[in-house]
Image: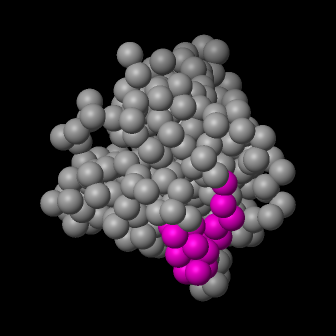
């Protein structure tokens, strides 16, 4: 059974075939959605275009979400070529590398501003731009991480950004509910991507993750794709303002089980 037949999704955040947004795009394609992609910079185009072709995306368009003109151009094209949209996927985050390697108290004013602008404000800006195209209601999905709720080594300013993102999800859900637009976040367990490579110590944490979690496994972009399909489908029609953990159960633990195989 295809859960997204007849729906159109605009997807932000594919950089390459390791991106969480690519896992989401593949799953949405398998479930019958019509897709269009945006990408952040010219140098990414040669990676994103072949992926777009694989899932018959209607178009791909450059959109740096820190630029209001890019957002306006992106949605003008979406209005022209797609008419209306049902799903918006926001799978975008950015912080300067130095903010993810030094102690949190050394976060610079500019580094803080950039992380909040690209990782949080962009959700608000994209939701506002999408509203006139979501005439039949819709579903907006963003990606969070547990570092927004608990302290994670070196996650630093991105933790603050994810806390703000989760709160923005709730405020947007309240604003847009009367338009029958749902807004939710998936809090993904650690996945090796371009973004996570910038977090100091990530690889070590990733390697220990499967041994600690209740499901004894790591998370894949396909796991996130499956949850994203459900959350943006009509099956989840009464779910809004939520943060859904897709992390093999890591977040329910107060302390990791001391199994013999865990080398901490
Ligand atoms: P990724 O690097 O593949 O994706 C991040 C995307 O953000 C890229 O496509 C990048 O081009 C885009 N981006 C950055 N600055 C931008 C800008 N100015 N304009 C437009 N796009 C911009 O990495 P990912 O891990 O797939 O990250 C996607 C989302 O998932 C992020 O919000 C990330 O915080 C979140 N997340 C990742 C993990 C993980 O372990 N990888 C875990 C939980 C949540």
* Up-down relation of residue 54 to residue 15 (above or below): above
* Up-down relation of residue 15 to residue 17 (above or below): below
Q: Which quarter of the rendering shows the N terminus?
A: top left
Is residue 68 on the magenta stretch? yes
In the displayed structure image, the side of residue 114 where residue 181 appears, left or right: left
Q: Position of residue 70 (x, y in %)?
A: 61, 75
Q: Position of residue 129 (x, y in %)?
A: 42, 70
Tell me where residue 214 sits by quadrant.
top left
Q: Position of residue 8 (x, y in %)?
A: 44, 44
Q: Position of residue 239 (x, y in %)?
A: 23, 42
- Which residue occupies 43% across, 57% down? 83
- Which residue occupies 65% across, 70% down? 64
* Up-down relation of residue 252 to residue 81 (above or below): above
* Up-down relation of residue 109 to residue 57 (above or below): below
Instruction: Tell which of 118 and 42 is nearer to you.
Output: 42
The residue at the far left in this view is 178
Tell me where residue 181 sits by quadrant.
bottom left
Which portion, as a residue range, is magenta? 60-76
Instruction: Tell which of 175 and 79 is nearer to you.
Output: 79
- Which residue occupies 79% across, 55% down? 45
In the displayed structure image, the side of residue 208 where residue 228 appears, left or right: left
- Which residue occupies 41% across, 22% down? 2
Instruction: Tell which of 47 and 18 is nearer to you.
Output: 47
Is residue 133 on the magenta stretch? no
Q: Which quarter of the rendering shows the C terminus?
A: top right
């Amino acid at each position: 059974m295809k859960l997204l037949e007849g729906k159109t999704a605009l997807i932000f955040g594919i950089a390459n075939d390791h991106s969480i947004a690519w896992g989401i795009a593949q799953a949405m394609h398998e479930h019958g959605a019509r897709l269009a992609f945006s990408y952040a910079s010219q140098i990414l185009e040669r990676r994103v275009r072949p992926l777009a072709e694989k899932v018959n995306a209607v178009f791909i368009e450059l959109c740096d979400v820190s630029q209001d003109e890019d957002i306006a151009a992106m949605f003008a094209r979406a209005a022209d070529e797609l008419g209306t949209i049902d799903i918006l996927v926001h799978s975008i985050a950015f912080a300067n590398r130095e903010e993810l390697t030094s102690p949190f108290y050394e976060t610079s004013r500019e580094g803080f501003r950039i992380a909040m602008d690209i990782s949080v404000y962009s959700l608000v800006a994209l939701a506002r731009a999408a509203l006139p195209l979501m005439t039949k209601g819709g579903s907006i999905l963003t990606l969070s991480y547990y570092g927004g709720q608990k302290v994670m080594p070196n996650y630093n300013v991105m933790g603050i950004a994810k806390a703000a993102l989760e709160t923005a999800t709730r405020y947007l859900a309240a604003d847009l509910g009367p338009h029958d637009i749902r807004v939710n976040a998936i809090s993904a367990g650690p996945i090796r991507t371009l973004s996570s490579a910038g977090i100091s110590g990530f690889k070590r944490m990733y390697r220990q993750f499967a041994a600690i979690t209740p499901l004894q496994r790591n998370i894949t972009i396909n796991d996130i794709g499956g949850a994203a399909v459900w959350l943006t489908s009509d099956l989840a029609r009464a779910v809004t303002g939520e943060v859904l953990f897709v992390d093999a159960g890591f977040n329910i633990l107060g302390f990791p089980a001391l199994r013999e195989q865990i080398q901490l």
